[in-house]
Image (spheres, rainbow, N blue to C red):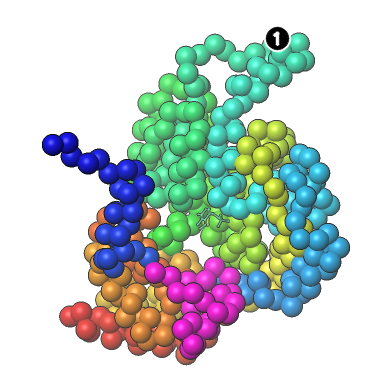
Amino acid sequence: MTEKVQSPADRIKTLVQMIKASDLYPVNPIVNSATTEPVIWVDGRDHLLFCSNNLLGLSNHPDVKEAAAKALDRYGLGSGGSRQMAANIDVHRALELRIAEHLGREDAICYTTGYMANVGTVPALIMVDLLQAIAASLLGKSDLVPPESEGSSWEVFSEQLNHASLVDGVRLARADVSKFPHKDTARLKKQLEASDKPSKFVVSDGVFSMDGDIAPIPEIARLAKKHNAMLMIDDAHGVGMLGENGRGSLEHLGVSTSDVDLQMGTFTKAFGGVGGYVAGDRDLIDFLRISARSYIFSAPLPPSIAAGVAEAIDVAEKEPWRREKAMENAFYFRREVESLGYDTLGSEAHIVPALIGNELKAAEVTKMLRHRGIVAPHARYPAVAPGMARIRFVMTCQHEREQIDYLLKCLAEVREQDA
Ligand code: PMP
């Protein structure tokens, strides 16, 4: 008797049903209000939200909303195509120049999301050999032809805890890849020394998204320079939040922009909107415009968002109290949650994880908090290593001390219940 083989669709359905029957399937509440406020409306009552990325409260700032509304009125809803075709609109270019100015860089390129910035940028840079060959053939310049090499001439050195979008960008790049352990610059040094590839590229997050700690960028930059490697830092969480002028991890750690070729970021977090960007020297940025597939073959930001985000950068610069308050909140919460016995995994910024460990246990803690009117989902494998599940709290400038104290009281109860 032949055994009936499950169709691929049935296999998937069986698996999903099994996951759904456990506590592992993520059940995110449907929110009936703006998720950019610390108090949200879920299941017919108020809840406190501790995972919003509206870090500086700019998503709902009146000037930001007005700038977006004006642009909506002027340009309409969408962009009408890609930047390479119809939709190279003045507000897109103004936003690129504005973020470049904020970071003290020559230029920047905007993508529709930060994810698209990373999956577009890393493989694009590695296409330099191909574009060199194309340019040589079109322009008749034999001195541009890259040396014949078997396979890729590139090796990418990627931090173990880099964000998924950077990981995917590295996967898409046709290059050898060496992963270096979290913050392990001694290992990175050895890997760079051992590499025989003529083109090297180091990529790291600035602030790590699941742990809230900060990369040792000065040493990474020193090693990259010594080994003639290109360096890109994903500072999605750092820009707007860290440094005297909110320029991010580089400013916070005293690293010169000239030591980091490309600074990537997102408008989704500190600037309260949506969109990604990469900033650096103009020719590097212009190279991305002709090689990054997620830029070329996709629609750009809606003009209203581009205008709103440019205004949000202005407000962030004018009102440093916003990042100072977010950081004060984070400092207070981290100190207090640690005193309850939670491990915060070396957090140094506004992202403060509380380690739970077991995945099912973390799901249970999320539920217990939900019963107490708190929305703070857990992060678990594959977003973090197996057995390292955690509740990932994000502190913003909109949280008040009493709200944080209520969260701490609930976390103390949860811990007691577990003891
Ligand atoms: N890089 C990092 C470090 C991130 O945390 C994120 C978003 N969580 C991204 C990139 C992607 O940004 P976006 O949400 O704009 O796609």
Identify the residue at horizontal 51%, vertical 40% (top origin): 169
Identify the residue at horizontal 50%, vertical 21% (top origin): 153
Residue occupying the far left of the picture: 1
Is 382 displayed left or right of 80 in the figure?
Answer: left
Residue 353 visible from this viewpoint: no
Q: Is residue 37 magenta?
A: yes
The x and y percentages for residue 120 are: 59, 40
Mark 1 highlights which residue? 142
Identify the residue at horizontal 47%, vertical 71% (top origin): 51
Q: Which residues are magenta?
A: 27-54
Q: Amino acid at mark 1?
A: Ser
Q: Is residue 406 magenta?
A: no
The image quarter containing residue 3 is top left
The x and y percentages for residue 216 are: 45, 50
Residue 91 visible from this viewpoint: yes
**Relative vertical location of residue 160 with respect to residue 288 in this rendering, above or below:** below
Q: Secondary structure at mark 1?
A: helix
* Viewer-proximal residue among 9 and 236: 9
Magenta segment's dominant SS is loop
Mark 1 crowd level (few <14, some 14–19, many ≥20, 10 Å Cα):
few
